[in-house]
Amino acid sequence: MYANISIPTDESDLSGHAAAHSIALAKRLDSRITLLTVVPPFHVLTTDTQMIEETRAAYKVRMLAQTEMILGAAGQVAQSAGVACATVHAEHEHP
């Protein structure tokens, strides 16, 4: 029925539940999944306190670590379930 299920994910509890449900569905359907997380780009002029306090390079390092944590956790759940999993990380204004 579904060959590939795309799962957008972030650090939220709701996202974690949705990912777990999607992985279970993929297992039942013998499908693969693609996990996606999107982070906002760095802005020099912003009201985001984390960006104000960091340099562009430090922000990129922190976002990469956060992305690896998010995708890694969901990827481990997929691997434990025996579901083939690909990961995608993107940067966009509107995650």
Image: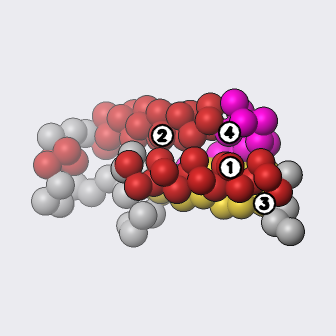
Label drawn at residue 24: 1
The answer to whether 59 is drawn above or below residue 17 in the figure is above
Q: Does residue 4 appear in the picture of this structure?
A: yes
- CA gap between label 1 and label 4 equals 8 Å
Q: Which residue bears the numbered disc 2?
A: 70
Q: Which residue bears the numbered disc 3?
A: 4
Q: Of the residues tagged 1 and 2, which is closer to the observer? A: 1
Residue 83 falls inside the magenta stretch? yes
Which range of residues does the magenta coloring cover? 78-89
Q: In which quarter of the image is residue 57?
A: top left
Label drawn at residue 1: none
Label drawn at residue 78: 4
Contact, mark 2 vs mark 4 (Cβ under 8 Å): no
Percent position of residue 79, x then y: 71, 33
Tell me the residue at 13%/59% (across/down).
47
Mark 4 crowd level (few <14, some 14–19, many ≥20, 10 Å Cα): many
Q: Of the residues tagged 1 and 3, which is closer to the observer? A: 1
Q: Of the residues tagged 1 and 4, which is closer to the observer? A: 1
Contact, mark 2 vs mark 3 (Cβ under 8 Å): no
> Which amino acid type corresponds to the residue marked 4 in the rendered image?
Ala
Residue 42 falls inside the magenta stretch? no
The answer to whether 34 is drawn above or below residue 59 in the figure is below
Percent position of residue 9, x then y: 50, 53
Contact, mark 1 vs mark 4 (Cβ under 8 Å): no
